[in-house]
Amino acid sequence: MQDDICYAALWDAGTAALDVSDPANPTLVSRFGSALDASDAIPAYDFSEPTGAYLAREWDFTAYLTAPGNAHYVQPSTNGDHVFVGAETFPKDVGVSDPDVDDYGGISVWDTSDLEEPSEITRIAPPVIDEDDSGKFFTSHNFDVTANRLHTAWYHGGIHIYDITHPSSPEPIADYDPDGYAFWTAVSGRGFTIGGVYGAVSSEGGLTVLHADRGKKRPPAFEGGVRQANPA
């Protein structure tokens, strides 16, 4: 959500930008990145049969879990001129034995300076795929966008930070990828990057707090290197 625009990730149906200036009457401004067409429509579930039977008959799980499509997370740039869309894919779950950067979901960057006609300008591929990838996955998940940084999480691929001063050419500037960890989110806060550690059960999860000064006792630098006199 930014100003009066709500951005919604709709999986294979792409990303929708909705004008919600009248919350009781949202209107579609544009939808982009869809992997579907009219022939992909399926009947609505009407609760007249078991859910499993409906899904087995109507749902293509291979298409659902693999590219293209899979828009899972979306966030606009601070000025609204660009939108970042993360795809989440699970190729191993449907029998892809040796997934590569095209099989796992990446982050697409869209020019939305004309919100009625967005255009894709680049894609950030998964930065890490381990050669020994048994029991691991490396798809994009939740991320955070600031004025000039993109903080990303890639499950077993770790946390990676990009300079997005030029959104069409993101530059990797830092990463954290320890063995045995998987990260489901990365967010920025007062100069730190906060990583959400994924656990198979709740007791295994947690948070990782990262900062470029390696723990030195000094005030954190804020995004873009500009220190705020009275940070909120």
Image (cartoon, rainbow, N blue to C red):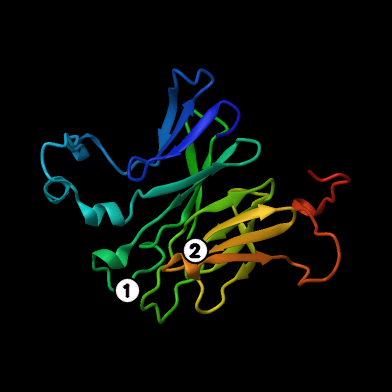
Mark 1 surroundings: few (<14), some (14-19) or many (≥20) residues within 10 A: few
Residue 195: percent from the left, percent from the top? Answer: 59, 62
| Residue 196 relative to residue 133: left or right | right
| Residue 106 relative to residue 44: left or right | right
Report the residue marked by disc 2: 154
* Between discs 1 and 2, the one toward the N terminus: 1
Quarter where residue 188 is shown: bottom right
Query: Measured along the vertical axis of the image, is residue 41 above or below residue 60?
Result: above
Residue 194: percent from the left, percent from the top? Answer: 63, 60
In this rendering, the label closer to the viewer, 1 or 2: 2
Report the residue marked by disc 1: 98
User: Residue at (41%, 58%) from the top-left corner?
Assistant: 105
State the separation of the CA atoms marked 1 and 2: 17 Å
Query: Measured along the vertical axis of the image, is residue 29 above or below residue 12?
Result: above
Q: Amino acid at mark 2?
A: Trp
Quarter where residue 102 is shown: bottom left
Query: Measured along the vertical axis of the image, is residue 103 above or below residue 97?
Result: above
> Which residue is at the far front?
203
Residue 98: percent from the left, percent from the top? Answer: 32, 73
Quadrant in which the C terminus is drawn: top right
Q: Amino acid at mark 1?
A: Asp
